[in-house]
Image: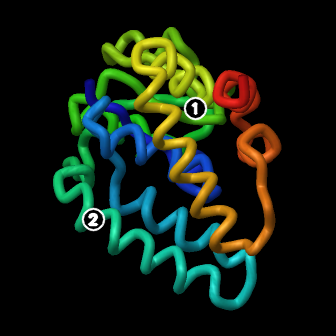
Amino acid sequence: MKVLLDTCVLFPTVMREMLLGVAGQGAYTPLWSARIEEEWARAARKIGPDGEAQARSEIAMLRIGFPKATVSWPPSLESRLWLPDPADLHVLAAAIAGSADLIITLNAKDFPRNILEEEGLKRLDPDAFLMQHWKDAPDLVQQVGDEVLATARRLSGEDWQMRPLLKKARLPRLAKALSA
């Protein structure tokens, strides 16, 4: 399964690490575009003066880890598409160009299901998507969650617990499942 990851699920870190950790285990093929990467880098400025540089470093590492994830398309593709927010057309174009099955986004209102269905696409939020994978392969998702938790503890110096960490990352159902 090919899955287009919108900017809003690549930044913040914990959500991205959960999604890409599951992809790294072979559960699905992640896709994004250079424009999505650029939006992520610019959004990271909000976390401080080093945020953008850190994001660009993370993007470079993702390009190495997922060398076939970045898709491109001809400008004519975007010109035939419509979404409620024209600023999101590039996301839909990337999904189509990459032959994605699904778009993972937190931005449901700007990706109406009926429009996506016309392009053979579906949309899910990251919590629902990760819960589907947890139901299919609980040990795999638990392992990724444990790795993300260990990294959060190491990098923050705080004694994070799984449930609060994933709830803060806007993954409340997964938080409950991995904490049970």
**Residue that badge 1 annotates:** 126
* Direction from residue 123 to residue 42 in the image, left or right: right
Residue 169 seen by the camera: yes
Q: Is residue 108 visible?
A: no
Would you call the spot at circle 2 few (<14 residues within 10 Å), some (14-19), or many (20 or more)? few
Q: Residues within 10 Å of mark 1 (few under 14, many from 20)?
A: many
In the rendering, at what x and y percent does residue 100 appear? 29, 29
In the picture, the quarter occupied by the C terminus is top right
Work out whether residue 158 or residue 50 is closer to the camera in this orientation and state it.
Answer: 158
Which residue shows up at 45% across the image and 78% down it? 56
Above or below — where is 166 with respect to 102? below
Asked whether the beta carbons under mark 1 and mark 2 sit within 8 Å of each other, the answer is no
Q: In the drawing, does residue 98 fall left or right of residue 162?
A: left
Q: Residue furthest bottom?
A: 49
In the displayed structure, does residue 23 sit left or right of residue 106? Answer: left
Camera-nearest residue between 180 and 44: 180
Q: What residue type is labelled 2?
A: Arg
Q: Name the residue under label 2.
A: 63
Q: How far across and how far down the image is residue 35, in percent?
A: 41, 60
Q: Which residue is found at the position 65% from the left and 35% from the top?
A: 106
Residue 121 place in picture, x, y as percent: 37, 18
Gap in Å between the C-alphas at discs 1 and 2? Answer: 21 Å
Location of the N terminus (image quadrant): top left
Quarter holding residue 78: top left
| Secondary structure state at the residue bearing disc 1 | helix
Of 12 and 97, which appears nearest the observer? 12
Q: Residue at x 23, y 38 (%)?
A: 97
Dot placed on the residue nearer the N-terminal end, 1 or 2: 2
Label 2's element?
Answer: helix
Task: Tell me where residue 171 appears, x and y as whole percent.
Answer: 69, 34
Is 86 or 134 nearer to us in this picture? 134
**Kind of residue indicated by mark 1:** Pro
